[in-house]
Image: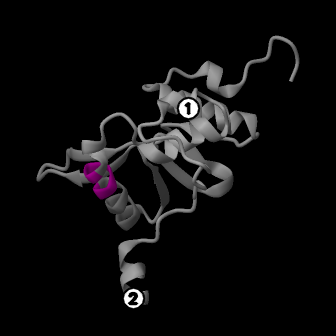
Amino acid sequence: MTIGDTLPHEDVRFAHNSERQFAKLLDFYGIVWEYEPRTFTLEEDHDGNTAQAFTPDFYLPAYDLYIEITTLNQRLVTKKNRKARRLRELFDVQIKVLYQRDYLNLLVKYGLEPPSQLADPPLDEPARLDLRPEPDDDAAAETA
């Protein structure tokens, strides 16, 4: 990188600060990412028009993994989980949903924001963040 070069996260207009912070972390570790690269149609109406769609926040090409960050409105978690499950069913893609607690742990662990951002009391040890895609429900049921 030479003087005047910018990091990828500096050239993107993110919908939320949490996405910018996550991209900044990926840039720091040299992980190539794409922001909202694709919208997937999850449901069509009787005329073939898109009735429901999902655009994951990030795609990590080296891992063939989509990441969805949900931090602002936890009431949307169930809806996003449903969309992520449907995405896996229809398109056979890997997706990981990062929840508010995951994001807050990243902030503390990597010093991206002050610990006062935590919703819970400070943790003695930050939880480990698991970026492996969730197993699809059918596979989990088969092994149970």
Q: Nearer the viewer, residue 29 or 125?
A: 125
Q: Quadrant of the C terminus?
A: bottom left
Residue 65: within the magenta?
no
Secondary structure at numbered mark 2:
loop
Q: Are marks 2 and 1 in contact (CB under 8 Å)?
A: no
Quadrant of the snapshot with the N terminus: top right
Hey, which residue is sitting farthest right in the picture?
2
Range of the magenta residues?
78-82
121 is higher (above) or lower (below) than 46: above
Residue 74 at x, y percent in the picture: 30, 42
Q: Nearer the viewer, residue 87 or 104?
A: 104
Q: Residue at x 41, y 71 (%)?
A: 136
Using the numbered discs, state the Cα–Cα distance from disc 2 to disc 1 in whole angstroms: 38 Å
Instruction: Using a 10 Å C-alpha cutoff, classify the residue at mark 1 as few (fewer than 14 neighbours), some (14 to 19) or many (20 or more).
Output: some
Task: Indicate whether 102 appears above or below 35.
Answer: below
At label 1, which amino acid type do we have? Pro
Q: Residue at x 36, y 79 (%)?
A: 138
Q: Is residue 79 magenta?
A: yes
Residue that label 2 marks: 144
Q: Residue furthest left?
A: 46
Left or right: where 130 falls relative to 111: left
**Which label belongs to residue 115?**
1
The location of residue 71, given as percent across then percent down, is 40, 38
Look at 26% across and 53% down and name the residue there. 78
**Who comes first in sequence, dot 2 or dot 1?**
1
